[in-house]
Image (cartoon, rainbow, N blue to C red):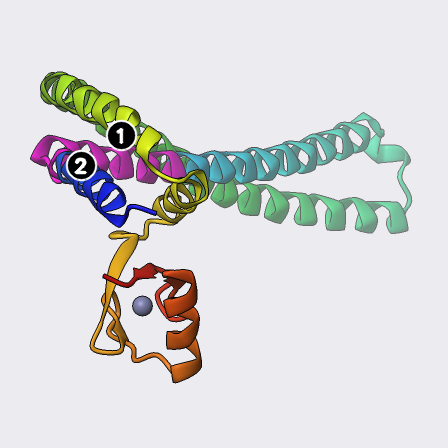
Amino acid sequence: MDINKILDYQKKDFEIIKLEFSLNESPNKKAINQILSVVKETQDSSAELEKNAEEILAQFNNLKKTYADNISTFLTLSKKNSEKLNEMEVDGMSNLMHTMSSNLSILEKKLLSLAEKVSGVLSGYEMAKKKYQKAREKHKEFKDKFDKEQSVFKPQVDKLLAELKSMEKGIEAKYLAKYKEKRQDNIFPVFVKFTSNACGGCMMELPSAQIEKLKKESILECENCHRLMFLE
Ligand SMILES: [Zn+2]
Protein backbone atom coordinates (compact mmCIF):
# COMPACT_ATOMS: atom_id res chain seq x y z
CA MET A 1 0.00 0.00 0.00
CA ASP A 2 1.42 3.33 -1.05
CA ILE A 3 0.58 5.78 1.72
CA ASN A 4 1.97 8.71 -0.27
CA LYS A 5 -0.72 8.32 -2.90
CA ILE A 6 -3.36 8.48 -0.20
CA LEU A 7 -1.71 11.52 1.35
CA ASP A 8 -1.52 13.29 -2.02
CA TYR A 9 -5.18 12.51 -2.52
CA GLN A 10 -6.00 13.90 0.91
CA LYS A 11 -3.96 17.04 0.18
CA LYS A 12 -5.84 17.62 -3.05
CA ASP A 13 -9.11 17.06 -1.24
CA PHE A 14 -8.07 19.68 1.30
CA GLU A 15 -7.93 22.27 -1.48
CA ILE A 16 -11.58 21.55 -2.21
CA ILE A 17 -12.43 21.77 1.49
CA LYS A 18 -10.75 25.18 1.69
CA LEU A 19 -12.68 26.45 -1.33
CA GLU A 20 -15.94 25.17 0.08
CA PHE A 21 -15.13 26.72 3.42
CA SER A 22 -14.41 30.14 1.97
CA LEU A 23 -17.64 29.94 0.00
CA ASN A 24 -19.52 29.04 3.17
CA GLU A 25 -17.88 31.95 4.97
CA SER A 26 -19.00 34.36 2.27
CA PRO A 27 -20.85 37.39 3.71
CA ASN A 28 -23.47 36.88 1.00
CA LYS A 29 -24.10 33.35 2.17
CA LYS A 30 -24.34 34.54 5.77
CA ALA A 31 -26.79 37.26 4.76
CA ILE A 32 -28.90 34.66 2.96
CA ASN A 33 -28.98 32.46 6.06
CA GLN A 34 -29.97 35.43 8.19
CA ILE A 35 -32.79 36.31 5.79
CA LEU A 36 -33.99 32.72 5.81
CA SER A 37 -34.22 32.81 9.57
CA VAL A 38 -36.27 36.04 9.37
CA VAL A 39 -38.58 34.31 6.88
CA LYS A 40 -38.92 31.39 9.26
CA GLU A 41 -39.82 33.78 12.10
CA THR A 42 -42.39 35.50 9.90
CA GLN A 43 -43.92 32.16 9.00
CA ASP A 44 -44.11 31.22 12.67
CA SER A 45 -45.75 34.50 13.63
CA SER A 46 -48.21 34.17 10.71
CA ALA A 47 -49.14 30.72 11.94
CA GLU A 48 -49.68 32.21 15.40
CA LEU A 49 -51.89 34.96 13.92
CA GLU A 50 -53.90 32.40 12.03
CA LYS A 51 -54.49 30.50 15.25
CA ASN A 52 -55.63 33.73 16.93
CA ALA A 53 -57.92 34.49 14.02
CA GLU A 54 -59.50 31.06 14.31
CA GLU A 55 -60.10 31.57 18.03
CA ILE A 56 -61.66 34.98 17.38
CA LEU A 57 -63.93 33.50 14.74
CA ALA A 58 -65.07 30.80 17.18
CA GLN A 59 -65.76 33.44 19.85
CA PHE A 60 -67.65 35.54 17.32
CA ASN A 61 -69.81 32.59 16.28
CA ASN A 62 -70.62 31.91 19.94
CA LEU A 63 -71.65 35.51 20.44
CA LYS A 64 -73.74 35.45 17.28
CA LYS A 65 -75.62 32.42 18.59
CA THR A 66 -76.20 34.05 21.99
CA TYR A 67 -77.43 37.17 20.22
CA ALA A 68 -79.83 35.16 18.02
CA ASP A 69 -81.14 33.30 21.07
CA ASN A 70 -81.79 36.59 22.84
CA ILE A 71 -83.58 38.06 19.84
CA SER A 72 -85.82 35.03 19.46
CA THR A 73 -86.71 35.12 23.18
CA PHE A 74 -87.55 38.79 22.80
CA LEU A 75 -89.75 38.14 19.76
CA THR A 76 -91.62 35.34 21.54
CA LEU A 77 -92.26 37.60 24.49
CA SER A 78 -93.33 40.55 22.43
CA LYS A 79 -95.92 38.48 20.57
CA LYS A 80 -97.76 37.73 23.80
CA ASN A 81 -100.70 39.95 24.57
CA SER A 82 -99.74 41.54 27.86
CA GLU A 83 -103.39 41.94 28.92
CA LYS A 84 -103.85 38.19 28.81
CA LEU A 85 -100.83 37.41 30.98
CA ASN A 86 -101.33 36.41 34.59
CA GLU A 87 -99.23 37.83 37.42
CA MET A 88 -96.71 34.96 37.33
CA GLU A 89 -96.26 35.35 33.61
CA VAL A 90 -95.79 39.11 33.99
CA ASP A 91 -93.10 38.51 36.61
CA GLY A 92 -91.44 35.91 34.41
CA MET A 93 -91.50 38.26 31.47
CA SER A 94 -90.01 41.11 33.44
CA ASN A 95 -87.25 38.77 34.69
CA LEU A 96 -86.55 37.63 31.16
CA MET A 97 -86.38 41.21 29.90
CA HIS A 98 -83.96 42.04 32.69
CA THR A 99 -81.71 39.03 31.89
CA MET A 100 -81.85 39.88 28.21
CA SER A 101 -80.85 43.45 28.72
CA SER A 102 -77.87 42.44 30.84
CA ASN A 103 -77.00 39.72 28.27
CA LEU A 104 -77.04 42.31 25.53
CA SER A 105 -74.78 44.66 27.43
CA ILE A 106 -72.32 41.82 28.11
CA LEU A 107 -72.55 40.93 24.44
CA GLU A 108 -71.78 44.47 23.43
CA LYS A 109 -68.67 44.56 25.61
CA LYS A 110 -67.52 41.22 24.25
CA LEU A 111 -68.03 42.38 20.67
CA LEU A 112 -66.01 45.53 21.36
CA SER A 113 -63.10 43.55 22.77
CA LEU A 114 -63.36 41.16 19.83
CA ALA A 115 -63.18 44.07 17.40
CA GLU A 116 -59.99 45.21 19.13
CA LYS A 117 -58.53 41.73 18.81
CA VAL A 118 -59.45 41.64 15.12
CA SER A 119 -57.68 44.91 14.47
CA GLY A 120 -54.66 43.58 16.40
CA VAL A 121 -54.54 40.48 14.22
CA LEU A 122 -54.97 42.56 11.06
CA SER A 123 -52.08 44.88 11.89
CA GLY A 124 -50.02 41.84 12.83
CA TYR A 125 -50.73 40.34 9.41
CA GLU A 126 -49.85 43.59 7.70
CA MET A 127 -46.54 43.76 9.54
CA ALA A 128 -45.71 40.13 8.77
CA LYS A 129 -46.52 40.71 5.09
CA LYS A 130 -44.22 43.74 4.86
CA LYS A 131 -41.43 41.93 6.67
CA TYR A 132 -41.81 38.96 4.36
CA GLN A 133 -41.77 41.07 1.20
CA LYS A 134 -38.69 42.92 2.34
CA ALA A 135 -36.97 39.63 3.16
CA ARG A 136 -37.82 38.29 -0.29
CA GLU A 137 -36.30 41.30 -2.02
CA LYS A 138 -33.17 41.09 0.11
CA HIS A 139 -32.94 37.35 -0.46
CA LYS A 140 -32.96 37.85 -4.22
CA GLU A 141 -30.28 40.53 -3.98
CA PHE A 142 -27.89 38.36 -1.96
CA LYS A 143 -28.75 35.19 -3.85
CA ASP A 144 -27.70 36.86 -7.12
CA LYS A 145 -24.44 37.99 -5.54
CA PHE A 146 -23.80 34.55 -4.07
CA ASP A 147 -24.59 32.83 -7.38
CA LYS A 148 -21.95 35.01 -9.03
CA GLU A 149 -19.46 34.06 -6.33
CA GLN A 150 -20.33 30.41 -6.76
CA SER A 151 -19.88 30.57 -10.52
CA VAL A 152 -16.30 31.67 -9.91
CA PHE A 153 -15.67 28.80 -7.50
CA LYS A 154 -17.40 26.09 -9.44
CA PRO A 155 -14.86 25.65 -12.28
CA GLN A 156 -12.08 25.51 -9.68
CA VAL A 157 -13.89 22.89 -7.64
CA ASP A 158 -14.79 20.91 -10.77
CA LYS A 159 -11.16 20.91 -11.86
CA LEU A 160 -10.03 19.66 -8.47
CA LEU A 161 -12.75 17.03 -8.39
CA ALA A 162 -11.61 15.71 -11.78
CA GLU A 163 -8.02 15.58 -10.56
CA LEU A 164 -9.14 13.82 -7.41
CA LYS A 165 -11.08 11.30 -9.46
CA SER A 166 -8.07 10.45 -11.57
CA MET A 167 -6.00 9.94 -8.42
CA GLU A 168 -8.43 7.34 -7.10
CA LYS A 169 -7.00 4.68 -9.39
CA GLY A 170 -3.78 4.58 -7.43
CA ILE A 171 -5.45 3.96 -4.10
CA GLU A 172 -6.45 0.61 -2.70
CA ALA A 173 -10.23 0.29 -2.95
CA LYS A 174 -10.84 -0.53 0.71
CA TYR A 175 -8.89 2.52 1.89
CA LEU A 176 -10.58 4.76 -0.63
CA ALA A 177 -13.97 3.55 0.56
CA LYS A 178 -12.93 4.14 4.18
CA TYR A 179 -11.68 7.61 3.27
CA LYS A 180 -14.96 8.57 1.63
CA GLU A 181 -16.95 7.17 4.51
CA LYS A 182 -14.98 9.27 7.02
CA ARG A 183 -15.26 12.39 4.89
CA GLN A 184 -19.01 11.89 4.84
CA ASP A 185 -18.86 11.94 8.64
CA ASN A 186 -16.95 15.25 8.46
CA ILE A 187 -13.71 13.74 9.68
CA PHE A 188 -10.67 15.49 8.24
CA PRO A 189 -7.81 14.77 7.82
CA VAL A 190 -8.78 11.13 7.57
CA PHE A 191 -5.25 9.69 7.45
CA VAL A 192 -2.90 10.79 10.21
CA LYS A 193 0.62 9.85 11.12
CA PHE A 194 1.21 7.64 14.13
CA THR A 195 3.83 9.54 16.04
CA SER A 196 5.41 9.31 19.52
CA ASN A 197 3.20 6.32 20.35
CA ALA A 198 0.08 8.43 19.76
CA CYS A 199 -2.57 9.15 17.16
CA GLY A 200 -1.47 12.15 15.08
CA GLY A 201 -5.06 13.39 14.97
CA CYS A 202 -6.12 13.49 18.61
CA MET A 203 -2.76 12.77 20.29
CA MET A 204 -4.17 9.93 22.32
CA GLU A 205 -1.50 7.42 23.27
CA LEU A 206 -2.01 3.86 22.13
CA PRO A 207 -1.72 0.81 24.39
CA SER A 208 1.05 -1.55 23.30
CA ALA A 209 -1.38 -4.16 21.98
CA GLN A 210 -2.79 -1.55 19.59
CA ILE A 211 0.70 -0.52 18.52
CA GLU A 212 1.49 -4.15 17.69
CA LYS A 213 -1.70 -4.34 15.66
CA LEU A 214 -0.82 -1.17 13.79
CA LYS A 215 2.65 -2.54 13.02
CA LYS A 216 1.08 -5.68 11.63
CA GLU A 217 -1.66 -4.01 9.59
CA SER A 218 0.15 -0.71 8.81
CA ILE A 219 -3.16 1.19 9.10
CA LEU A 220 -5.35 1.30 12.18
CA GLU A 221 -8.43 3.26 13.12
CA CYS A 222 -8.05 5.45 16.21
CA GLU A 223 -10.61 4.41 18.81
CA ASN A 224 -10.87 7.99 20.03
CA CYS A 225 -11.13 10.21 16.93
CA HIS A 226 -11.79 7.47 14.34
CA ARG A 227 -9.08 8.73 12.03
CA LEU A 228 -6.88 6.24 10.24
CA MET A 229 -3.38 6.13 11.64
CA PHE A 230 -0.48 4.99 9.50
CA LEU A 231 3.10 4.08 10.21
CA GLU A 232 5.70 5.91 8.24
ZN1 LIG B 1 -7.13 9.83 17.24
Residue 110 vs residue 227, the one in the foreground: 227
Q: Amino acid at mark 1?
A: Met
Asked if disc 1 and disc 2 are in contact, CB closer than 8 Å, the reply is yes
Tag 2: residue type?
Lys
> Is residue 133 at least partly visible in the picture?
no
Q: Label 1, label 2: how many angstroms apart (C-alpha)?
A: 9 Å
Q: 96 or 108, which lies in front?
A: 108
| Image quarter of residue 21 | top left
Query: Predominant secondary structure in magenta?
Result: helix
Dot 2 falls on a residue whose secondary structure is: helix
Query: Is 137 in the magenta?
Result: no
User: SS for tag 1?
Assistant: helix
Of the residues under marks 1 and 2, which one precedes in the sequence? 2
Please indicate whether residue 228 sits to the left or right of residue 38 in the image.
Answer: right
Q: Residue at 23% of width from left, 67% of height from top?
A: 200
Say whether residue 34 is magenta.
yes
As rendered, which of 69 and 187 lies closer to the eye? 187
Name the residue tied to disc 1: 167
Q: Could you say where residue 87 lies in the image, as x and y percent from the top left?
A: 88, 49
Vertical relation: 187 (above or below) 181: below
Circle number at residue 12: 2
Residue 196 percent coordinates (x, y): 20, 77
- Can residue 188 be seen? yes
Dot 1 crowding, Cα within 10 Å, few <14, some 14–19, many 20+: some
- Determine which quarter of the picture holds residue 80: top right
Question: Which residue: 39% across, 83% down?
Answer: 208
Residue numbers of the magenta segment: 22-45
Instruction: Please tell me whether mark 1 or mark 2 is closer to you in this view.
Output: 1
